[in-house]
Amino acid sequence: RGIAEITTAGANPLGVGYLTDSTGAFWSFYVDSSGLKLKRSANADAIDPSVLLGAIPITSTTDLFTLDPGIYYGDNVTPVNGPAINSLPTTNYFWVKLEAPKANVSVKKLTWTDNGDNHYANDYYGAPSKWHNWQVPNSGTMATKSDVTTAVSAVNANMVHRNPDTGVVSEPVDFTKLTVEGGKSVATSDDLKSVIDNSWLPIKIADGWTSTPVLMKYDKTNGKTIITGMMSKPFGVSDGTCTEALLTLPDGFYWNEVDNSMIGINQANILEATINPDNKKELIVSYKWKWSSPASGNAFVGYNEAYSIGSDEKVTGTYYETTSISQA
């Protein structure tokens, strides 16, 4: 298993990746002008975990608008030109990723994700090119609680009512041509089901973890679920072995199997992962601190491009895809 990041430097491609084998040996691989190179570097326990993340630290004087393409992280700092977040700098950790086309530096994309429930994006473009306002990505494509409430209220106000004592419908209605004032069709139960099927649903995380919203969307046509979000918590050797319901699915869904690729915890060794036989919505995970030095830090779980854990082929864009979830 490992993490890899490919970047560019001038006209020469650079690549660096890190792998650990079954014996705990640590391997690095990279690409230069002569091809792919693989080298056994050291034992995994001897590696600084921040190296594995492939990220560059940010300080309070770092101007996000002047970064080079790459992945960056900050710890209790407020960088220059970051999004206006009231919790900064108390938000413990955040990640920033700058992307730019190789041949066109006048178009850039900057994304921000932190453990204080914040996810923002900013774009650099125009004539002349300039940075624009920080925005919540895809905020207009998700069905909100207000959307669902509005749809339900519209149906209730225009539905056919029955006598509560006899169950008899007391109002004549042509069900094939049922409309509201203005000739618009009334939403049916299938319409509402469609709204739910296309909504992001929250996954409950274990107590003690701080997270962005960890959300899932289930596709009943192929049985696949995509998950996005990240979570972290202070952890260390003194905490010993921790066993908890790490992820609990929303009502109407259950775990059909353990997907080991999605339960990797940075900074920790997974000892066991099982489905709660008495409540199959719960994924029970046992883990302990991975390193002898440092003796403590922050454990991370992430389900997006910058934090992907597990097989690269299971990561699509900023989502993690799995078939380990079924609909009841």
Image (cartoon, rainbow, N blue to C red):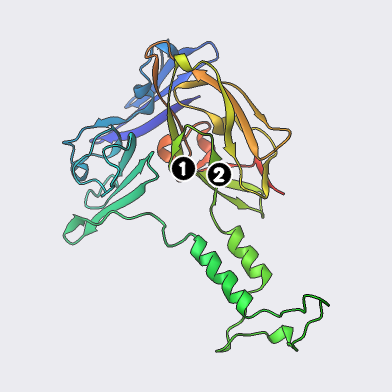
Residue on which disc 1 sits: 229
Point out residue 116 in the picture as x, y percentages from the top left corner.
Answer: 37, 41
| Residue 290 can be seen in this image | no
Q: Mark 2 falls on what kind of element? A: loop
Point out residue 85 in the picture as x, y percentages from the top left corner.
Answer: 28, 47
Where is 150 relative to 37, above or below?
A: below
Q: Quadrant of residue 267?
A: top left
Q: Mark 1 falls on what kind of element? A: loop
Gap in angstroms between the C-alphas marked 2 and 1: 10 Å
The label on residue 278 is none
Identify the residue at horizontal 58%, vertical 88% (top origin): 183
> What amino acid is at disc 2?
Ile
Cβ atoms at labels 2 and 1 below 8 Å apart: yes
Where is 31 relative to 326, above or below?
A: above
Which sits earlier in the primary sequence, circle 2 or circle 1?
2
Q: Nearer the viewer, mark 2 or mark 1?
A: 2
